Image (spheres, grey):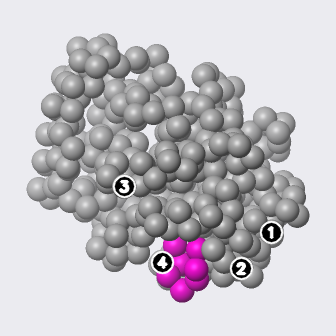
Amino acid sequence: MSTRTLGTGPAAVASGALGLGLMGMSGMYGPAEESESIETIRAAVESGVNLLDTGDFYGMGHNEMLLGRALKQLGLDRDAVRISVKFGAQRGPDGSWLGYDARPAAVKTALAYTLTRLGVDHIDVYRPARLDPRVPIEETVGAIGELVQAGYVRQVGLSEVGAETIRRAHAAHPITDLQIEYSLISRGLEEAILPTTRELGIGITAYGVLSRGLISGHWTPERSTHAADFRTHAPRFQGENLTRNLELVEALRTVAEARGASVAQIAIAWVLAQGTDIVPLIGARRPDRLAEALGALEVELTAEDLAQIEKAVPKGAASGERYATAQMSSLDSER
């Protein structure tokens, strides 16, 4: 697999062209089979994927423990992978979302639990999941910087923050990358955020490149979701929004078939084509879905291909917001 570099100078991290997002392996999209999840991680690493992304609140720690078990069972060399961890989201015992805590003491406490659950002695990229409105970003980043100095963290990352916050954070400590949703139907970062990260030499790890399966080419109007599945309540998967969004997928399918590729491969290839400072995170939970995603690396889009894709799925064409109203209001990146 070809490699890409996130960040510059001392903050630089070498990554495979694709990363693996583990969130879906811990119930966010309904039940997942652990053995299948671990097999997917194995297949990813053997294929050259070295960036593994998790969050301490995915399954209330389950996702980190899963990754820890995978590292042990597969006998993976710790230095052969880059572990990216998001922290700060607060959840109740019923799974409800309670806000964010990015105070310096909370940052360090969260990391202590993360290291234990993963069974490792350091994290490669550590990042607040969202901006805590009660805590200046300089304090949060400063606390992570202290963990860098102590050897527990290698690099500092951000997630779903806007251009002003990125500048403030980067001034406090070099930032390696910003994790943010980016896909054919989620292009909000292009206006101000992406120019800012490029000016500052900060990379992008793009999640939601298939919009949680919506533009994978596999979603159908009849598909049911588990009660615990995030998509059960996501606006883009509801009613007329879903109907209109799947019409975009069918237009994209025409382009994909002309290229001899799947819809998912074209959608991932499009994100890859937006710049070598961007590493798409693939949310595959099964080896076959991973294999399909990896096939995107063989799809080289021409200028004509990109024009056809833009015509099929114009910027701003998606129906519905990417999160429910309450969640959207917490996103610094959307302000």
x then y, percent, for residue 295: 47, 21
Spatial CA distance of label 2 from label 1 is: 10 Å
Q: Secondary structure at mark 2?
A: helix
Mark toward the start of the polypeptide (4 vs 3): 4
Given the image, on which type of amino acid does mark 4 rest?
Trp
Apparent side of residue 177 relative to residue 227 in the rendered image (left or right): right
Spatial CA distance of label 1 from label 4 is: 28 Å
Q: Is residue 182 above or below residue 112?
A: above
Given the image, on which type of amino acid does mark 2 rest?
Pro
Q: Secondary structure at mark 3?
A: loop
Residue 146, numbered circle: 1
Q: Which residue is mark 2?
A: 104
Mark toward the start of the polypeptide (2 vs 4): 4
Image quarter hosting the N terminus: top right
Q: Callout 3: 10 Å neighbours few (<14), some, many (20+)?
A: few
Q: Is residue 311 magenta?
A: no
Kindly report which numbered mark, 4 or 3, lies closer to the viewer in this rendering.
3
Spatial CA distance of label 4 from label 3 is: 28 Å
Q: Which residue is mark 4?
A: 97
Given the image, on which type of amino acid does mark 3 rest?
Ala
Report the number of discs. Answer: 4
Q: Is residue 261 above or below residue 335?
A: above
Q: Which residue is mark 3?
A: 192
x then y, percent, for residue 117: 77, 62
Tag 1 and tag 3, C-beta contact below 8 Å: no
Mark toward the start of the polypeptide (2 vs 1): 2
Residue 46, numbered circle: none
The one of 86 and 146 positioned closer to us in this rendering: 146
At 35% from the left and 65% from the top, the residue drawn is: 334
Quarter of the figure with residue 107: bottom right
